[in-house]
Image (tube, rainbow, N blue to C red):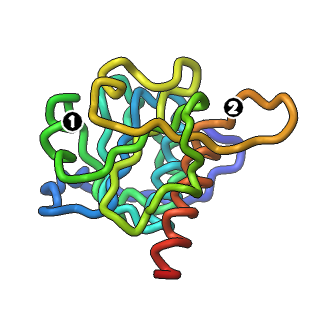
Amino acid sequence: DTQNPQGIAAVFSIPYPDLPKNPQRVLILDAIREPGNMGTILRTAGAAGAEIVLLAPGCVDPYNPKAVRSGMGAHFRVPIVEVKWYEVQAYCEKLNIYLAAGEGQTRHFDVDWTQPWALVIGNEAHGIADEARNLQATSISIPMSNATESLNASMAAAVILFEAQRQRLQS
């Protein structure tokens, strides 16, 4: 799979964690298809304090070798749970839900990330799914200069998650 592997091998059971009760910081991945993005987002989620990552339908296997490699151990630091959209709705009913969408009228740094939240990051090519748009959610955007249309899914996740972490640390 790589030309210069790290030379480390291990066999282990894939963890199937329980959903944390009363989460405050939930990341929801919507049909993320690129394994490198999956791993990078998981690593970022762990570093920025997400309590759980929910994988909505259509996501690549988080244990794909490329996802595990780019996750750099995040798979063991943050619970990862595959869910259906109706489960997302029920699990996040007490949270402020935000959709990372280019057309969002609310800027990501204007959100009060010190309040309990769930953040949806959409598919690399198609953005946020209709099922996610049906959630009681606020669309947010990352202001960009020039004619840049959008960021890579893992970059958008990093920008927003670390803004949430910054606000939490300053509160």
SS assignment at label 1: loop
- For residue 150, which numbered disc appears in the image? 2
Q: Which quadrant of the view contains residue 145? A: top right
Q: Is residue 81 above or below residue 75?
A: above
The answer to which of 102 and 58 lies nearer the viewer is 102
Residue at image x 15%, y 55%?
19
* Residue kind at label 2, given as amino acid type: Ser
* Residue kind at label 1, given as amino acid type: Val
Can residue 99 be seen?
yes
The answer to which of 65 and 110 lies nearer the viewer is 110
Residue at image x 51%, y 72%?
167
Q: Is residue 163 above or below residue 155?
A: below
Can residue 36 be seen?
no
Q: Position of residue 55 (x, y in %)?
A: 32, 38
- For residue 155, which numbered disc appears in the image? none
Residue count near mark 2 (Cα–Cα under 10 Å), binned few <14, some 14–19, many ≥20: some
Residue at image x 38%, y 58%?
10
* Residue labelled with disc 1: 83
Q: Which quadrant of the view contains residue 146? A: top right
**Which of disc 2 and disc 1 is earlier in sequence?**
1
